[in-house]
Amino acid sequence: LPRELRDLIHDFYLRCDGCTYDHNSRKLHTAELEKIDLSLMYTCKQIATEMHGLPLQKNKVFFTTVYPKNLRSNAGKFAALLTRLHELKKSLLGRSQGFITSELMSEIQIQYPNLFPILDRIKTRGSCDNLTNETCGFPPSIHYDFVTECLRLLSKDPQFGPHITSTKWNSMGPRNTD
């Protein structure tokens, strides 16, 4: 058969109403929840070569954010763990007043100009956890990155490590001993 006719056959054979990713089986299936028929591709090497990649080119693939029920509790625990980690980081940043240098402030002002006022207030006002709860209207992920970067830069100071290890901790994080 001529190539043009074979291409029409391949198109007709592969076309469906789209494919959906099944999280439970970890496979693609048709919109009607049927297995995608690729048996024609296995008839000979020439057809397999001609059809390589066509199933995904000819059909839309839909992914959802739904995940298997058995992973939901783990996802919730992971989210809670990440939230707790960020709370601890924010609390630690709020108690790092003495280590915030002008060089660190300059670098943060370049990287996070809109979140810079938070660091400036920590430096000028001292330990103040509620200041680090502000996100200045930015997505939480940007705020997480800001806090992490501040702590990364603070950790370059050789005295910062001993400061952290000498800090008294309770179940809520570092606490003032003043």
Image: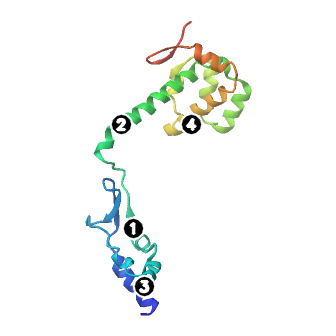
Query: Camera-side residue: 121 or 155?
Result: 155
Q: Dots 2 and 4: beta carbons under 8 Å?
A: no
Q: Tag 2, which secondary structure?
A: helix
**Residue at image point 40% right, 32% down:** 80
Label placed on residue 7: 3
Q: CA distance from mark 1 to mark 4?
A: 34 Å
**Residue at image point 44% right, 72% down:** 57
Q: How is the image coloured?
A: rainbow
Q: CA distance from mark 2 to mark 4?
A: 21 Å
Q: CA distance from mark 3 to mark 2?
A: 47 Å
Label 1 sits on residue: 60
* Circle 1: residue type: Lys
Mark 1: few, some, or many residues within 10 Å (few <14, many ≥20)? some
Q: Tag 4, which secondary structure?
A: helix
> Dividing the image into 4 quarters, which one contains the N terminus?
bottom left
Q: Dots 3 and 2: beta carbons under 8 Å?
A: no
**Residue at image point 54% right, 8% down:** 177
Query: Camera-side residue: 163 or 40?
Result: 40
In terms of sequence position, does the residue under pointer 4 or pointer 3 come before the other? 3
* Circle 2: residue type: Gly
Image x and y of residue 154, in percent: 65, 26
